[in-house]
Amino acid sequence: MPARRLVRADVQELWWRIAIVSVVVLVAAVVTIRRRNARQAPTQPRGSVPSQLDRSDFSAPQTPWLVVAFTSSTCATCGDVLRKASVLASKEVAVQEAEYSRDRALHDRYHIDAVPALVIADSLGVVRFGHLGPLSATDLWAAMARCRDPQLPVTECAAPTTESPTAPTNESPHSS
């Protein structure tokens, strides 16, 4: 009789183990199926630059060209973009920083949702070049030269520049 109880106990323990393993496999299968069927979040836009500026919103509206660097104090790369843009300042080119906490109205008006954002606008406020993210000095100066070249059609001004060695950060100015 004791041998039968031992066999019965072993069989009962085996059934419990099979049941536990079955439950674990079932849970894993359900989780896998739910992950496969889960809807992915839609792709979000990465930000954009305005296509038109009201020159009276910015300093020196009488200059033929305006370079605006939309920045934020919380942005790690904004200072670098502003320094590169500042070199372009001359009698013909006004350069202005629109820092988020100080110039929030400009960020809101022009729907700036990622920084650094840099635009080059002509005397009418038409944005001839726009860029989001870090920008090399060479690319910025080349864009300004294309915009100011009277021999190039206006559409050539916004020709794509070569890729910067660093990827755009598209930092939100609203992170403070």
Image (tube, rainbow, N blue to C red):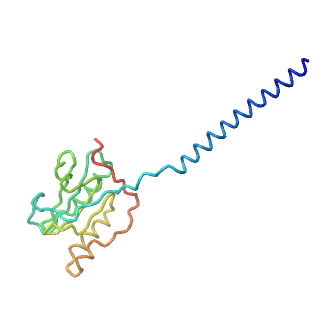
- Write down the quadrant of residue 93 in the picture: bottom left
Instruction: Give percent across and percent down for residue 123.
Output: 13, 69
Question: How many numbered discs, if any?
Answer: 0
Q: Nearer the viewer, residue 29 or 58?
A: 29
Q: Quadrant of the C terminus?
A: top left
Left or right: 132 as drawn, with respect to 56 = right
- Picture residue at 25% right of the left edge, 67% below the top: 129
Q: Is residue 64 above or below residue 27?
A: below
Q: Residue furthest top?
A: 2
Residue 15 placement, left or right of 120: right
Q: Which quadrant is home to the N terminus?
A: top right
In the image, is 81 to the left or to the right of 165? left
Q: Nearer the viewer, residue 89 or 23?
A: 23
Q: Is residue 89 above or below residue 10?
A: below
Residue at image position (25%, 76%) is: 155
Q: Quadrant of residue 29?
A: top right
As displayed, is residue 162 above or below residue 18? below
Along the viewing direction, whichever of 112 and 26 lies nearer the viewer: 26
User: Could you tell me which residue is drawn at 12 percent across and 62 percent down?
Assistant: 55
| Image quadrant where residue 140 sits | bottom left
Q: Position of residue 164 (x, y in %)?
A: 38, 62
Q: Is residue 114 left or right of residue 91?
A: right
Residue 146 location, x and y as percent?
Answer: 25, 74
Q: Position of residue 153 (x, y in %)?
A: 23, 80
